[in-house]
Amino acid sequence: MQRVLLTGAAGGVGRRLRRLLPPVYPEVRLTDIAKPPDLAPGETFLAADLADLAQVEAVVDGVDGIVHLGGHSVEGPWETILQANIVGCYNLFEAARRKGVKRIVFASSNHTVGFYPRHRRIGTDVPVRPDSRYGVSKAFGEALGALYADKHGLRVLCLRIGNVADVPADHRRLAIWLSPEDLLQLIRIGLEHPDLRYEIFYGASRNERAWWDNARASAYGYRPAGRAEDHRAAALAAEAGRAPDPVGDFFQGGPFCSDEFDGSTDDVW
Ligand code: 15L
């Protein structure tokens, strides 16, 4: 794997990966809708709007693998999600097919399964239970990845990312935190593992409070090094003064579940 494209390079996760990818991959091309303000002299950047297929084809041309972080990374109005995450994700997979790209690592999200309760441990084989339009768009991306793997032979790894940060930010993130270094380990499996065709992994570090069974990732050799509990005191201190959220605190997706929740059904509990 020589030439790698990183979409969403200007975002928080993209910024962290820009430090970690170049020592591993000789040629990293960055893209986003607008140039990152902190672009370093050696970094190669090409702007593209994911909603424009011709622009996406131009940026994927000549790369071997793609790490697709691009799109809208939280809940948003339907039009925003539609263009950035549905149309944008389709354009990315279709452009990759047309240009002969071999592998895609797709940044999916824990919000594909956010309406599972926290007391339930789930693998990646459960039906999706999205907690937002954003979560639905990520489930769409996972399905699209399966289509392009089965029909067109792309090798695709979908990462249901918890929360990428230098340290876990709060109580919920103690269960779902993913260190940037562990994310790199997962990406390397997606871009390099010879047996990988299509898989879904959870993007989480070695978190003792995890709600997820990440056996598929372990089977491919994932050995996370980050341990959320090492940061427990600071994460719990960050909770001080937070108002209780009965819906968000019960379900895995947290505030994405309580946002717009209208309480009109008991079946979800
Ligand atoms: C996500 O999918 C978001 O991209 C990220 O910004 C966080 O909100 C994260 O989920 C989370 O669940 O904490």
Image (cartoon, rainbow, N blue to C red):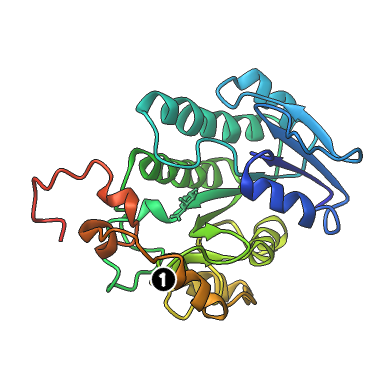
Say which amino acid is labelled 1.
Trp
Mark 1, residue position = 212
Can residue 130 be seen in this snapshot? no
Relative horizontal placement of residue 235, taking residue 211 as reference (left or right): right
Percent position of residue 89, x then y: 53, 34
The residue positioned 48% from the left and 47% from the top of the image is 146
Mark 1 Cβ and ligand 1 under 8 Å apart: no
In front of the other: 140 or 241? 241
Rendered image quadrant of residue 220: bottom right
Disc 1 is placed on an element classified as loop
Instruction: Give above or below for 83 relative to 233.
Output: above
Q: Where is residue 127 in the image (x, y as percent from the top left)?
A: 30, 57
Q: Quadrant of residue 259?
A: top left
Which residue is at a point 57% across and 48% down the rendered structure image? 106
Question: Residue 98, position in %: x, y?
Answer: 66, 29
Q: Which of 158 and 177 is in front in this view?
A: 177
Residue 158 left/right relative to 25: left
125 or 15: which is nearer to us? 15
Name the quadrant of the C terminus. Answer: bottom left
Residue at position x 67%, y 25% in the image? 48
